[in-house]
Structure formats: structure tokens, C-alpha cells
Image (cartoon, helix red, strand yellow):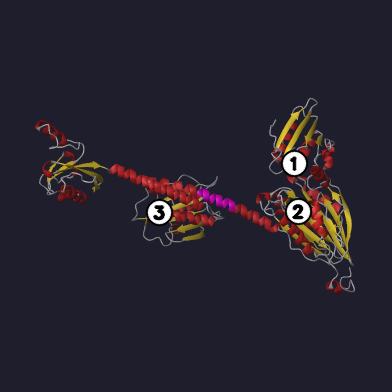
Amino acid sequence: MSTTSDDSVFHLDTALDATGDAHIRITGDLDWDSADEFTEAARALLRADPAPRRLRLDCARLTLCDSLGLASLLMVQRASAEAGTPLHLDNRPEALRRLLDMTGTAELFDGSAGRAADAPDASGEAGAAPPPGRT
Amino acid sequence: MTRVEGSLPQGQELLSSVGTAWMRAPYPALVVDTAGALVEINAQAARLFPAAGPGIPLADVAPDWLVEGHRRAAVTGGEDAGGPVRGRHGQWTLEAHATPGADGQVVWWLVDDTHRELAETALRNEKERHGFLAEASSRLLASLNTERCMEVAVELATRYLADAAVLVAPAAGRRHPLSLCAGDGVVHRTARIEPADVPGLKEALQGFPPVPSRWIDPSALPEWAVPEGFDGPVGSVVVTPLPGHGVPAGALILLRRSDHAAFDASEESFARVFAARAGAALSAARLYMEQTSITATLMADLLPPMLRRVHGVEFAGSYRTAQDTERVGGDFYDVHPGAAPGDKTLAVLGDVCGKGLEAAVLTGKIRSTLQALLPLAGDHQHLLRLLNGTLLNSRHTRFSTLVLASVLRQENTTHLSLTSAGHPLPLIVRQDGTVEEAPTSGTLIGVLPDVKSTTAEVDLRPGESCLLFTDGVTEARGGPLGDVMFGDDRLRAALADCAGMPAEAVVERIHMLVAEWIGDNRHDDIAVMAITAPRTTHLTAVDGHTAGRYTA
């Protein structure tokens, strides 16, 4: 757990609660500099055994999400869909809400994405490749 | 040791014992009288001056500097001689100290100073080399151009290490770039050479340790390895590798004339230190040049096209890349004119997520795919679905957002079909300055297995424009406080003033306002495209569409 209080500094707080939900609280800007750290942290949680019941991302302290930030959210969405773990994006700031609406991706993050139907289509090169982060 | 006969008051007995000891002192000593003739010499001095003996003039056996020193010391009988005199004698460097003897005689004590001299010379050389290396580093690293870097390396090597230097770079194809220097001026050449012709060169180019110079026969050097202007036969040769980052950066051949001392071990090892610096600089320059040329090649194909009027509709675009090259986003736009005046023209403007080459490659892929799919341009949904399928990738979720605009002018009305695929919505400015958002929506491209979109149908009257833009415009940070986004409201207000303007002017105005807003702040890529229904002009009058000017 990080103890930094400065909101402009990116950091993640992760936790696993008694009900089996995994939580990540994102503080700061989700952009080029922080996207990989976020994706890795989420993947690590999804890999846990037993797998978390749900993955909840708390965005209350998210100050900015640029296109690479959205790409990382989509990557986490893909990983959670593959793991069969529903993903929730909680406390979306206005800017994030608008970004998700504009890009038509809002519904991917409302917890319904654990269904197999939402997994990426096995078209072209996507077919042969194993899920990211697994062997 | 400086006390001799005559200066001890105790008596003859002690004096004679000192006299004996003096003869066997470990340092050479001479007693010289006021006339400059030797009185006595001890055993060490006799070894140094074999011809010396009592009565012989000092000038006959000793070097000039000592004779001159004695002439001055004799005036005072060795008192206050003003410090030692120094000079060379044969292979030695000697320091001579004068002390007073009996009857105005002077006793000279000689100290062998040869080693100190050598040490001082070595220290001086070392300082010089250190200075040279510092200069070499700063000059070598000053340029990221490989040819310039090779030039500096041979120039420096010729100035400090050898009479001539040849730098052999790794082969490009079958030919090796060479830089040769024999004093003044550097010659660059690319030649098909056989590295095995120079002993050790083939190994040096592969990065193996250098061959000691004594193993290299100077007469065996091929002609290409001796620069023009090198006068006299080659006396000695050193071949040393230029170690690069992981791969050898080339090899350096150093040549000395036969009248110049051959390379000694310390010079060879110094040459290796120099070569290490030159190699590092050269390989950095090479990596940089390679990367620059790859980027330039790709970017040349990705630069946005010049836009113009197509089938009676004005198109204008402007693209400003991010200053921070590390974060080049990948905005793009294209206009594909309809084959005939009655065919729709497809305009596309988009933004690829990512930076640098990665983004550039994805941009290129999207642009060529769209070009290939042009026959299907009438159905935006179908087009986007096909494009999405091409871009899907299991490794990453890099996406693109874009706007498609199919444009067709019929009489005075310009019909637009606008579809946003996850992109900021196009804005339309009406004749009266009203600004509207095109009611389209859709999912971004390249990540999700399926994409959905709705198309907006918009008609433009003469003087009305549709503005397509990337989020670099609305998210541009600046203003009086430096950290405020340009935002939708400012963009709408700016666009309201553009009613009735030609497309070029609309783009120019928006671009200028955003640039002013940003000031010196960092910004992302910014792309803007205006699609404008021109006010009816003579040109359209000639077309027969209208009866006169400005019928709008």
C-alpha cells in the first residue's frame, strides 16, 4: 500500500476483500508512463489462485485517462474476460465517462464482460496466440 | 655528506677517515680547483667519467653544462652556488651539487636523476593523453552523423597517435566504408576490399583482440590501406578493433613512417583506449542514423496529403505533430476523390493510440486498408467492420478512432454522410454561425470483436463547413494559466466565427487559435480538416449550376 497523498503522483492501491473481490484504486494520471504498471498489477490479481470473484477498479482518484490509458483499460478488460472475472469500473470521473461513451466502450466495464462471448474473436493471428501472461 | 676536508675543526685523524669514506661514497663526487682542473675523483665518478684523473681539465671529460656550472661556482669557491645544475651525460640525467672544498676548490656531488626524469616524462605523457582523450570524447560525441564521426576519429588518430590512420567500417553489402587521413584532410571512400589482406584486420572487424604491431609486416600492406599523401615507407602498423554496442563498429589501422619510432606497448594500449571511445561514438551514431532513416522512410509515406477542391467541394487540412518526438501520436487524414463528379468522395480523419514508430505503422496499415476498401465506401458500417477485422490483434489493445465522411455535391447542396468510430464528433457551422454536432456514434476500431456505429446525414448549404478534428485540439493545454484545456466550448466559439469562410481559412483560423492557446506548452498531435460547401462563385456559374454570384 502506498502512503503518498499527492494526487498528481500515479500510484495503485490493491486489495483482496473477504468476499473474494479484488480492488485496484487508481490515483493520478493513467497514461503512457503508468499504463504498463496498471496492466501488470491487474494481471497479477487475475492470476491469483483462487481467481477473484470480481475485479473492481476504483477511479475516484483518476485524474486523467488518455488514449494509452484507455488501451490499458481495454487490455485489462480483455484479460478479465479471458479469466472469466467480471470487471467493474467504479466512481468514473466525468472525463472518463465521456471518453468511454465517445469510444463506445462504456458497456465493457459494467461487470457483464465476464461472459465468453465478449472474449476477442479468434480471427487471424489472434487465433493461435495463447492468452497474454499465461503459458 | 656535504661536509668535507677543511670544514671539520677536529683534526687530521677524522679527516683522513672521512677521506677514505669519501672515496667509496655511493654517489659520484669530484674535486675541481679554481682553474678548472680535476684534483680528485671518487670511485663512482671514475665509472661515470672513465677518462678523468687528477690534473685533467674538467672540460675534457665532463659535459658542457657541468663545466659551465663549475666556472660559476669557482668564483665563490662553491659557496652559495645558487642551487644544483642539471643536465644529461650519456644515458643518464644528473643533478650536480657544489660544496666548498679547501683552498677555493669546489667539491661536486652528482646525483643520478634519470628515473625521476623518466617518471616526470611519463606523467607528462599521461596528462597529455588524458587531455587528448577528453578532447577526443567531446569531439567524437559532438556528431551523430557516422561519416563525420569517422572523420573525427581518423583526424584525431593522425594528430596524436600515428602519421596516418585508416578507419574501416563494417561492410555495407560487400563494400566497406573507409575514412583515410594522412595529415591534412580526410578522404571518404567505399571500396570492395579484402580484410584478410591486412594481418589482424579481419579479426578486428569481428571484434577480436588486436594483433601486436610487431607481428604485422608493414611491407605486406595492400595499396588501399595506405592513404594518399603518406610519404615514405611504412615503418610500423597497429590494427585495433573499434568495439561498439554489442557489435564491432569497425577497425582502425594506424601507420607510422619508418623514420618514426615504432609503436611501443604503452602506445598500443593507448590506441586501444582511444579506439574504445571512437567505437562507442561511432556505434551510437550508426544506431541513430539507422533509426532516423527508418523513421524518415516510414514517415515520408505517412505525411498527410495536400488537400484541394474536389468535385465542387473544398477540402483543407492541417497537421501539427507533437514537439515531443517520443510521443508522436499518429493523427492522419486522407481524401479519396470520387472517380467521377457524380461519385462520392471519401474523407477520413483519425487518431491512432500509441507513439512513435508503433503508431506510425498502425497509421500506415489503416490508411492502406481504407484505400483498398474504397469500393465499399458507400456503406460505412461495413467498411468499419472490415477495417476492424484487419486490425484485431491478440497482443495489444492499441486502437484507432476515426471519422468517415462521404461527400457528394448536388446542385447547391453538399450531402455528407458522417460516421464516428469512437472519435470526437464532427462540428458543423451554419451560415448564421450556429454550431451543431453531427449526431453519429460508434465504437473504436481495432480492439473489440465487433463494432457498431450510426451514421449522420448532414447537408451543407454554400458557405457552411464541417470540421473534423482530433482530440489534440480540444485537449490542447495552455491559456493564461498554462494548464487549461482548449475544450469544446472554445472550439465551438472559434468555429462560429468561421461561417462563410473558405475551407483553407477555417483550418487556418482554428489552427492559429489553438497554437496561440498552447504557446510554448507541450502538446499532442493536432489534426484538423474542413469540408466546406463553397459560396457560389464564377467557377460554379460556369458549371451552370447557378445563375449568378453569391446566390446563397
Counting from the top left corner in percent of width and height, residue B73 is at 18, 47
Q: Which mark is residue B473?
A: 2
Q: Secondary structure at mark 2?
A: helix
Q: Residues within 10 Å of mark 2 (few under 14, many from 20)?
A: many
Q: Tell me how far mark 3 sits from mark 2, CA to CA.
A: 59 Å
Q: Are marks 1 and 2 on the same chain?
A: no
Q: Is residue B282 magenta?
A: yes
Pick the front one: B319 or B515: B515
Is residue A134 at all visible to an observer of this figure? no
Q: Secondary structure at mark 1?
A: strand
> Mark 3: which amino acid?
Ala
Q: Tell me how far mark 1 sits from mark 2, CA to CA.
A: 19 Å
Q: For the N terminus of chain B, which image quadrant?
A: top left
> Mark 1: which amino acid?
Thr
Counting from the top left corner in percent of width and height, residue B190 is at 52, 59
> Mark 2: which amino acid?
Val
Pick the front one: B61 or A44: B61
Residue B549 vs B66, above or below: the answer is below
Q: Is residue A111 left or right of residue B106?
A: right
Q: Is residue B329 magenta?
A: no
Which one is closest to the eye, mark 3 or mark 2? 2
Q: Is residue B274 left or right of residue A70?
A: left
Counting from the top left corner in percent of width and height, residue B182 is at 42, 59
Q: Read off the residue under disc 3.
A: B162
**Label 3 lies in what chain?**
B
Q: Is residue B202 left or right of residue B357?
A: left
The first of marks 3 and 2 along the sequence is 3
Q: Read off the residue under disc 1.
A: A63
Looking at the image, which residue is at 43% across and 49% down? B131
SS majority, magenta: helix
Q: What residue span does the magenta drawing correspond to?
A: B279-288
